[in-house]
Amino acid sequence: MVKCVSPGDGKVFAERDVATAEQIAAALDKAKAAQKSWRKLSIAQRAKYCTAVVDAMVSMKDEIGKELAISMGRPIRYGAGEVGGFEERARYMISIADQALASVNPGDKEGFERSIEREALGVVFTIAPWNFPFMTAVNSIIPALMAGNVSILKHSSATLIIGERFEKAFAAAGLPDGVFQHLILSHDQTADVIGSGKVDMVCFTGSVPAGRQIEQAAAEQFIPVGLELGGKDPAYVRADADVAFAVENIVDGAFFNSGQSCCGIERIYVDASVWDEFVPAFVEMVKSYKLGDPMDEETTLGPLIKSSAADFVRTQIEDAVKAGATAHIDAADFPADKGMGSAYLAPQVLTNVDHSMSVMMDESFGPVVGIMKVSGDEEAIKLMNDSPFGLTASIWTKDVDAAREIGQELETGTVFMNRCDYLDPALAWTGCKDTGRGCTLSSIGYESLTRPKSFHLRVVTG
């Protein structure tokens, strides 16, 4: 039995039995059989089905917003944004499938017909996280189907019913049986599925330790594994930045979803010349947040996914303060925070921090950010790269050329200028270092979901 416990009130929101060995075997066999006919459909036919899936999901957005608030603590006022992001990504990937999956023509060669075709892999196994449960899952599911694969989804136990929402949307769209399936699995069962020899790709979003376990489970299968394993994303505020604009957007990028975003801002480097303007404005804006019941329309900061996650961040903050950091937020101003053991955690802004502190090096995944003063671009680049992660980095400046030059030096998957904590489906979503490997979305994302097959045909006449 798997239980989904609401972080808002600590009550069990949903509980489901894990799949039996027989159910798992049947699902894998059904997927293999379904893929044989699904891959033969035209891209236009697949697009019709997938578009209907998106339409069905969008029609459920009000119910989804409530379920997200209860199951993982996202304030209900932001519920529609999750479905909006799902829709944007899905519709874009559907729209580019014809071009992205087109044959590659290497040029004419007398007496030969040559091409490189993009062939579906088979069964794509998506293991999705709880923090953005629709937007992360859709990154692989819809493109996989558009490429001629079939999909099996294993969702986080913290968002059990999200898989059921996907099932309802696919059922409403009338997809052939077996093209999409949802399984509730234990960790051991998940590893068994990966190592079964019956899935052809694994797409995982989660922690670094879990990513290592995924790779170990797939080690002898010779299948591609896509891993997005989090980040410690930096922001750099240059001397020429629009400070008010930077404050507004970086605060949102750091504290949206209670900081539980792999591409959220977790560390900030500010040029000394704008430090005195930036820090007070940043702190004041954070103080304006309301921590409370995620079902309350006034709430802008909900609980973390569980109390242990909040306690980890509390410990990071306490350790940093003991080492000399300055905490700018009084937790007493956020009475919903009851201290250790509570999933409700007051936001925190720290200065006088350095890279010897966990809060500046280890992924926090909570509402805390450290801010350091820097002398200019060279120091900022050095500090931004001083991390085991490399998902996104943002530069706040009026100088596009400077942003490009700095971006070339950064060890990251995405470089933002005057933006953060956003995923553009037209661009490759990827990372480096402990953030993982592989790519989703954009035309390049389709390359991960297909294998090249070359046709070298000699034309014999006479």
Image (cartoon, grey):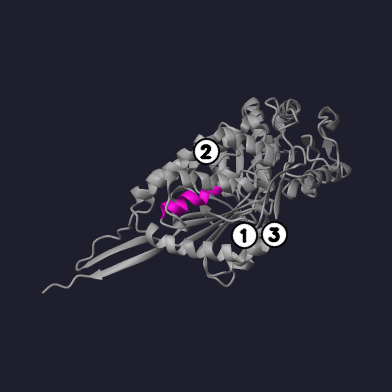
- Disc 1 marks a residue whose amino acid type is Ala
Give the distance between the C-alpha atoms of the residues marked 3 and 1, in whole angstroms.
24 Å
Is residue 436 or residue 72 the one in the foreground?
Answer: 72
Q: Residue furthest right?
A: 322
User: At 42% across and 42% down in the image, what residue appears?
Assistant: 51
The picture quadrant where one finds residue 113 is bottom left
Name the residue tied to disc 2: 401
- The span shown in magenta is 136-147
- Quarter of the image with the N terminus is bottom right
Q: Is residue 461 shown to the viewer in this render? A: yes
Name the residue tied to disc 3: 209
User: Of label 2 and label 3, which has the lower sequence position?
Assistant: 3
The answer to whether residue 37 is above or below residue 234 is: below
- Disc 3 marks a residue whose amino acid type is Pro
Count residues near mark 3 (Cα–Cα under 10 Å), then give few for <14, some for 14-19, many for 20+. Answer: few
User: Of label 3 and label 1, which has the lower sequence position?
Assistant: 1
In the picture, measured across the screen, residue 150 lies left or right of residue 359, that is left
Q: Is residue 30 magenta?
A: no
In the rendering, at what x and y percent does residue 23 appear?
57, 62
In the rendering, at what x and y percent does residue 298 appear?
70, 25
The answer to whether residue 379 is above or below residue 18 is: above
Name the residue tied to disc 1: 19
In the rendering, at what x and y percent does residue 334 appear?
81, 29
In the rendering, at what x and y percent does residue 407 appear?
57, 45
Is residue 373 or residue 170 the one in the foreground?
Answer: 170
Give the distance between the C-alpha atoms of the residues marked 1 and 2, in whole angstroms.
54 Å
